[in-house]
Amino acid sequence: MAAADTMFGESLKEFGAFDFNACYNCGTCTAVCSLSDEQNSFPREMVRFSVLGLRDDIHSSVKPWLCYYCGQCSTHCPQDAKPAELMMSLRRYLTSVYDWTGLGRKLYTSKAWEFGSIAILALLILVLFLFLHGPMTTELTDQGGVKLNTFAPWKQVEIGDWIMAGMLSFFLLSNIFNMYLKIVRKNKGLKIPIKLWFTELYNLIVHFATQKQFSKCDTLGTGKKFTFSSYWIIHWFLMSSYVIMFIMIVFFLGWFQTDNIYHWTHPQRLFGYYATAGLLTGVVWFFVARFRKSDEKSKHSHITDWTFLVLLFLTTVTGILVQIFRINGMPYPTYYTYVIHLMVLFPMLMIEVPFSKWSHLAYRPFAIYFDRVVQAAKKIK
Amino acid sequence: MNRKLGVYICHCGGNISDYVDVEKVKAAVEHDEGVFLARTTMFACSDATQKEMVEDINANQLDGIVVASCSPKLHLTTFRAVAERAGLNKYNYVHANIREQVSWAHSDNKTGATEKAIHLVKSAIARVRLAESLDPITIPSRKAVAVIGAGISGMRAAIELADMGCPVTLIEREHFVGGRVAQWDLLFTTDQTGKELVTRLYDDIAKRSNIRLLTGAEVIENTGNIGDFTLKVKVTPRYINERCDEGNLQRAIDACPVEVPDDFNFNITTRKAIYHNFPSEYPQYPVIDIKNCTRCGECEKVCGSIDFSQQEKTVEVKAGSVLMATGFDPYNPSEGEFGYLQFDNVVTLPQFKRIIDMCEEKLTFRGKDIHNIAYIYCVGSRQVEAGASSAGGSATDRYEEASRDISGENRYCSRYCCTSVIHSAIETKKRFRAVNNYHFTRGIRTYGKQELLYNESLKMGDIYLQSYENDPPSVIRENGKTTVRINDIMTAGKEISVNADLIVLVTGMVPRSDNRIASLFKLPKGRDNFFNEIHMKLRPVETVIDGVTICGACQGPKNITESVNSSLSAATKSFSYVSKGELELEPIIARVDAALCTWCGKCMEACPFDAVKKVVDGGKEIAAINNSVCKGCGMCLPVCPVNAIDLVAYSDQEMETMINALAEDIK
């Protein structure tokens, strides 16, 4: 038995949901959803849970992560209850629920916390540089480039990188573990053979790498199993760029942050171009979409959606500038831009990866993975 | 009797002629005694054939016609009109049904069908040979209408009748007008209060000199019939003079030591023996409830207007038509039904409406703050057969579960309650702080514009849960806390519980428990025990008792709009009975042969319309038929032991000759 609680709906509104109370349970949303199926029927059920405030049912549900927000449900809702936006809000809410530190909730529901944290982390970087930076030499390399590694030796920066990566992994993984407790361990009495964790593992990898569910979104009535929608392609371009960049700066910093100026066909430059192109295209594309509000999924923007885009945009632009200044032998612009670049990059990663929007990149494939394991275990039973 | 008859046999396009050999029928009857002409026709009801019939009758001076076609339910009036257009008395036309009773019924046996058609047509011919020309019965009709019940329907009807120039007597049993509507506060769509509506109608009534309002008045006897009703009305006095000082009266109310449950507030409060329901209640001076008054004299000490010498009197009201607007009772749940009278925080919807009306800043009931309200829908409406729902009801020391048995006779939907409760829930939320509304429904029926209200309440965050009739919600008291539980079909049958401070049973409408008025007028009731109209769609305010119309919720659950719609309709219908000063009635009625009648009273017992009376005629007791009341149903005929009663146009002679024709051998 579950107790109804109207207060839950109020708290969900802080995560961006609105008007979902208007739902009269016709089920049109579920009928028009291309991703809803017999095992996982949504969004009506999630709307219902939210209206009634059935927290336990929401916390243990993977369904919000199975939705990729095509917005068809909101378009067709006769009550204008905006089920798609509710699903989006539930993803924000669940992100804060999985986060055991409680920071996620603060960052989502309080602007002071969100902007305050960014400012503090940026200041931290600034202070570190003030005290620890190397000589700001104006001497150029033989190729005419700025000696960036003299100002900020990559070995030292890498130490910071590793500390940051360690913290990110710790928080994100512990949050994923928390997610596992809520979703998988919720099925009391269900025995899951260890073997299943391996046989179903491909789901995690495939869905992370391809995000193929995204391509199935909004296919209802087209007769197709998937579409190469520009939305999916751009999102994938952005995501892959982000991942490449992340790998390069955390694992291959020495190779990436070099004082050498390679020929443009060199992998260091090619990867860099790909990643910056992807980031720029994606960010601008999403910016424009959210400004124009032309499609359902871009109509409603939570403050954290904007923050993420702005931070990502600034990171990308400052990164590009650092490269331009360095190659063209402009020492001071290179140094200052580099500091600003890190002052944006660091808060963005620290806030977004474990506690906020970025984490969906991990939660989505894990949700599918956990769901498949549970389904398979139930079948055995 | 030498008659000249015309017989028309219809093909009905093939509906008849595909199975009945109409030419053979024609050949079989055209030489019957009196038949001057016999024709077959493709469609007897077509304009062309109707014109042909008129020409035939005129050209040949026919004095009787038979049409053999479809059911008389379809075209009896059509061919009666044909006869009248040809100058022939319409009762000289007899109908034979050879479609529903022959071709459609015997499509498997064409020979037999044809034979049966011949028999039926022959018997119709036999009857028309004996047909008489009849004239409608004309009776005088008094231009006055008695309206019973001064609720919203009765008051509105009275005003309408008065404006059409018809004197009206408005008879109200209570001492105050307005009925149920006066008990309601804000109403949906207009956002006026019930009191405002009643005040407006009362002012309109007071302005009209041709409305006589009797309050505290109860009809105790009804004699007469359409056009001439005589009602005896017992009028209870108020025991207070009309000219009185308001301040003194208030002091008299304060002084009264008697406290009795207050009906107006559905017994959630008490009132004095001298009372008014609310300060501006109409008529605007209080009344002494003499049944509960102890005659202690306290009120007389402070107020000079009190007059215990007033006497009950009987008033005679004469009217040509009676309009019934006696309203409804709210369903009264049985003890323990969803915890009613078992738990102290379970109330009915009418009680809840009074509670929110009486609360000022804080919503409280029995001294406790109310935040979570659970509304259980369809209590006393849409009931199911016994055994179809689980009964519930168990108790241990700290755990008590109320009965959730919803079996009963009230199968109908009360229509108004969904809207009414949602409106009240919204008003409650708007007026009081921190109120959560939980609706336990069986499907929402806020039809028409009322749907907007449902939408508004959803958007305000009201929660709707739904169950089927075989699994109603349960009300549980555990450790002093009351919860309502439901297997919510909107959440895949999941059990959801709500901790409720107040439980409102959304009770529907039932017929008035005091139904003496119905027996006085012999008003027929439907299966649901509300008054019954003649035809739900086509004659919605008339009853089988001529001259008596019905409207408002005495006829079945209605909201105010629907009640007033029907009341205006009933006013017009009642006025049509009295407007001309006389009435024309069907001449097909029973007739008593005074020579044969020995008065045994059996016919009087058999008559469902009270049309038979004992009279003394030339020193002999015989039965007499009241022409204005008799419907010609024929119930009195077979019970007469001396065969003294005949029915006009259906006399024994006519019936016998028809039977003979049916039994005749066909060559």
Image: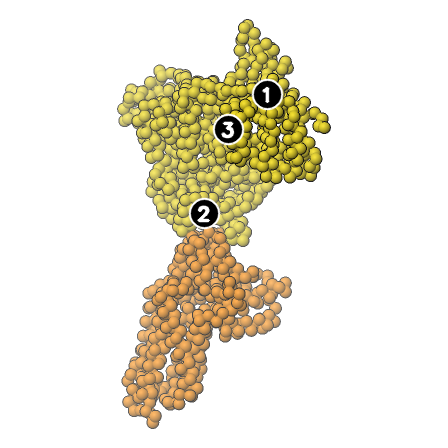
Chain colours: A orange, B yellow
Relative image position of residue B111 (x, y in whole percent): 70, 35
Residue in the image at 40% along x and 73% along y: A282
User: Which part of the image, by quadrant, shows the N terminus of chain B?
Assistant: top right
Disc 3 is attached to a residue of which chain?
B
Left or right: residue A327 versus residue B417 is left
User: Amino acid under label 2?
Assistant: Tyr
Mark 2 surroundings within 10 Å by alpha-carbon count, few (fewer than 14), some (14 through 19), many (20 or more)? many
Front tag of 2 and 3: 3
Residue matched to label 1: B3
Q: CA distance from mark 2 to mark 3?
A: 61 Å
Tell whether A101 sits left or right of A185. left
Residue picked out by circle 2 = B438
Instruction: Find disc 3 in the rendering and name its residue.
Output: B81
Q: Earlier in the sequence, mark 2 or mark 3?
A: 3
Dot 1 falls on a residue whose secondary structure is: loop
Crowd around label 3: few <14 · some 14–19 · many ≥20 (10 Å): some
Residue drawn at 51 percent across, 32 percent down: B51
Cα separation between marks 3 and 1:
21 Å
